[in-house]
Image: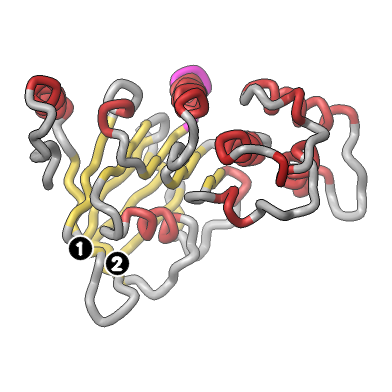
Amino acid sequence: MNNTVEFKNVHFGYTSDDILKCISFDVNEGDFVSIIGSNGAGKSTILRLILGEISQYRGSIKLYGDDVSKFKNWKKIGYLEQNAYSKILNFPATVYEIVMSNNFSDIGLFKFPNKNHRIKVMNVLELLGMEKYKDRMISKLSGGQIQRVFLARTLISNPDLLLLDEPTNAVDRETIDLIYKILQDLNRDKNITIIMVTHDLERIYNISNRIFCFEEGSLLELDKNQIYDELSHKHKHPHDDSICSC
């Protein structure tokens, strides 16, 4: 099975203190990996390292077999950052324009979208249940609707690897259900590899084939049978907060 992402003995810290301490793991093609852990532990930093946004680490990080510093084919990677909608609340653009904007590497510089590009936008908006809002200004949507638009924008480039930083944070339950269903279908039916940072252990248990816990600088892969036992225990003892304290 081919490795999509490979970390080997990776250390990183924004100060002299490392928040990633000798992290080693790999993600295989077709995996659905969820990373859980407490707020501020450094889960999002792992995604930023994969994206090559951080260079001052020690160790080895590879994407599709290439060192991340030499990786060129970024069209293969789709990224949805945490609370992306908060950065664009007053941006003067429609839903259609926001989604189309991630298609211009395919369209080409100083060229206009053709019929196929327009169809792609409408198809992905329909997938997210947002086609009827295509002409609405992004600032007129709810947080959940905007998150759907940004997921549509991420998916329009047909990525092979999806990196998602808490994609269901602070959105409505309908949007949460829809996003998880779409991600499950993309992973199962199109073999898209997914790495998702999340707190929603109960929901992702059924759709992830691998679950990691990141705490105190270490990344530990959890045994799904153990998670099942702990979730069952939590349902019987809802005030017990000991689940997955790694």
Q: Residues within 10 Å of mark 1 (few under 14, many from 20)?
A: some
Q: Up-down: is 156 above or below 188?
A: below
Q: Residue at x 35, y 23 (%)?
A: 207
Q: Quadrant of residue 223?
A: top left
Can see residue 159?
A: no
Can see residue 1?
A: yes
Q: Nearer the viewer, mark 2 or mark 1?
A: 1
Provide the residue span drawn in magenta.
Answer: 188-192
**Residue 22, disc:** 1
Query: Percent x, y for residue 37?
Result: 24, 48
Q: Up-down: is 12 above or below 33?
A: below
Number of residue marks = 2
Q: Main secondary structure of the magenta part?
A: helix
Q: Up-down: is 159 above or below 219?
A: above
Q: Residue at x 74, y 24 (%)?
A: 131
Determine if the magenta segment contains residue 35: no
Q: Earlier in the sequence, mark 2 or mark 1?
A: 1
Q: Quadrant of residue 232?
A: top left
Q: Which amino acid, mark 1?
A: Cys
- Pick out the residue farthest to the bottom: 16
Residue tagged 2: 59
Question: Is 39 left, or right, of 131 in this rendering?
Answer: left
Question: Is 137 left, or right, of 86 in this rendering?
Answer: right
Say if mark 2 contacts mark 1, CB within 8 Å. yes
